[in-house]
Image: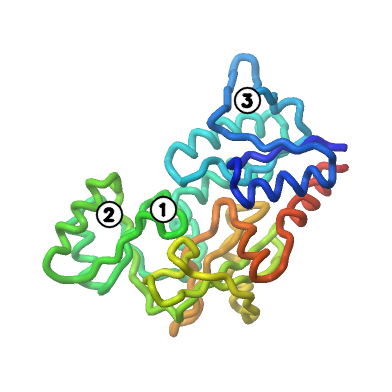
């Protein structure tokens, strides 16, 4: 049987589920924390803890760390080295690198004509203020975040410029301003495996937050989107070449729009809303590509 490692977070629901699914199929369980990584460029090896990745048959990157941050880019570069040496890695580090940074993801989506909320990027608080005055209520988004962490809603009026200056001083040198949409109380996670559509779940707002994330009290529900939403999400994820991902889509009065493509994708929404064992499906997908 093949030895497949999982780069993830110990105790993380999706990471543990994937490691368990692989163990059920292969008898080998290996959950690896990149904090313990050691890259020897001269020796051409990458070890994580006591595990030399050269002894594995494949690797799945479920999470490069517990929180999105620029540090994950360096961890992915370490993994890119062993991928370049021939180790099959899912999703490829280069693919994740292109989507991890919110700005990089947004630029790619817009270059492929994917509809998104009006967005302005600048380093200057005064320019950001002018954008908010023009667009109305907006959301300030850190370039590295998930589940709406660190996001702030701002509106035209007194105090706006000071809010933007504080946002920048908090470590957001690039100010990402996106028009706040009048959401229908939910947004959608449209999941893909190997570029093929799996299922869709909705994140439903319980009425106590401006966003729908589970982190802010939302809940998962099953959802059957129309074909045009599935096709939009398919087009959105296609340029990145990710093996597993979820595309965040919202239905608006102007048609469906995309917020982002997930670097790693989550399993919990698919399990709770759709009863879908995404970890098992992903394990079967990887084993099918490297040969059991």
Write down the residue under mark 1: 103
In the drawing, what numbered circle is on residue 49?
3
Residue 79 versus residue 240: which sits nearer the camera?
79
Question: Gap in Å between the C-alphas at discs 1 and 2?
Answer: 11 Å
**Eye-nearest disc, 1 or 3:** 3
In the drawing, what numbered circle is on residue 122?
2
Q: Residues within 10 Å of mark 1 (few under 14, many from 20)?
A: some
Q: Residue at x 34, y 65 (%)?
A: 178
Question: Gap in Å between the C-alphas at discs 1 and 3?
Answer: 33 Å
Report the quarter where the N terminus lies. top right
- Place residue 132 in its image quadrant: bottom left
Local secondary structure at mark 1: helix
In primary-sequence order, the first of circles 3 and 2 is 3
Question: Gap in Å between the C-alphas at discs 3 and 2?
Answer: 41 Å
Q: Residues within 10 Å of mark 3 (few under 14, many from 20)?
A: few
In primary-sequence order, the first of circles 1 and 3 is 3
Local secondary structure at mark 3: loop
Report the quarter where the C terminus lies. top right
Q: Position of residue 142 (x, y in %)?
A: 36, 53
Local secondary structure at mark 2: strand
**Residue at the top extreme, as displayed:** 42
In the drawing, what numbered circle is on residue 13?
none
Q: Position of residue 7 (x, y in %)?
A: 63, 39
């Amino acid at each position: 049987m093949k030895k497949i490692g999982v780069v993830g977070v110990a105790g993380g629901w999706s990471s543990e589920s994937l490691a368990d699914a692989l163990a059920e199929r292969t008898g080998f369980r290996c959950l690896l924390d990149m904090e313990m990584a050691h890259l020897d460029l001269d020796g051409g090896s990458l070890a994580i803890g006591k595990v030399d990745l050269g002894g594995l048959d494949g690797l799945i990157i479920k999470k490069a760390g517990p929180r999105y941050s620029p540090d994950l880019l360096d961890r992915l570069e370490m993994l890119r080295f062993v991928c370049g040496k021939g180790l099959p890695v899912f999703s490829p580090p280069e693919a994740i690198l292109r989507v991890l940074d919110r700005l990089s993801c947004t630029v790619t989506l817009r270059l492929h004509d994917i509809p998104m909320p009006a967005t302005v990027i600048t380093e200057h608080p005064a320019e950001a203020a002018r954008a908010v005055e023009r667009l109305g209520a907006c959301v300030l988004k850190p370039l590295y975040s998930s589940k709406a962490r660190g996001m702030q809603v701002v509106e035209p009026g007194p105090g706006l410029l000071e809010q933007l200056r504080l946002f920048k001083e908090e470590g957001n040198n690039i100010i990402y301003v996106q028009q706040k949409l009048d959401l229908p109380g939910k947004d959608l996670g449209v999941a893909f495996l190997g570029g093929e559509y799996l299922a869709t779940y909705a994140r439903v707002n319980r009425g106590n937050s401006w966003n729908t994330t589970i982190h802010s009290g939302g809940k998962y529900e099953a959802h059957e989107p129309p074909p045009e939403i599935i096709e939009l999400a398919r087009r959105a994820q296609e340029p990145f070449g990710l093996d597993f991902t979820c595309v965040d889509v919202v239905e608006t009065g102007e048609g469906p729009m995309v917020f982002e493509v997930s670097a790693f994708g989550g399993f919990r929404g698919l399990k709770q809303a759709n009863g879908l064992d995404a970890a098992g499906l992903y394990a079967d997908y990887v084993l099918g590509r490297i040969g059991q």
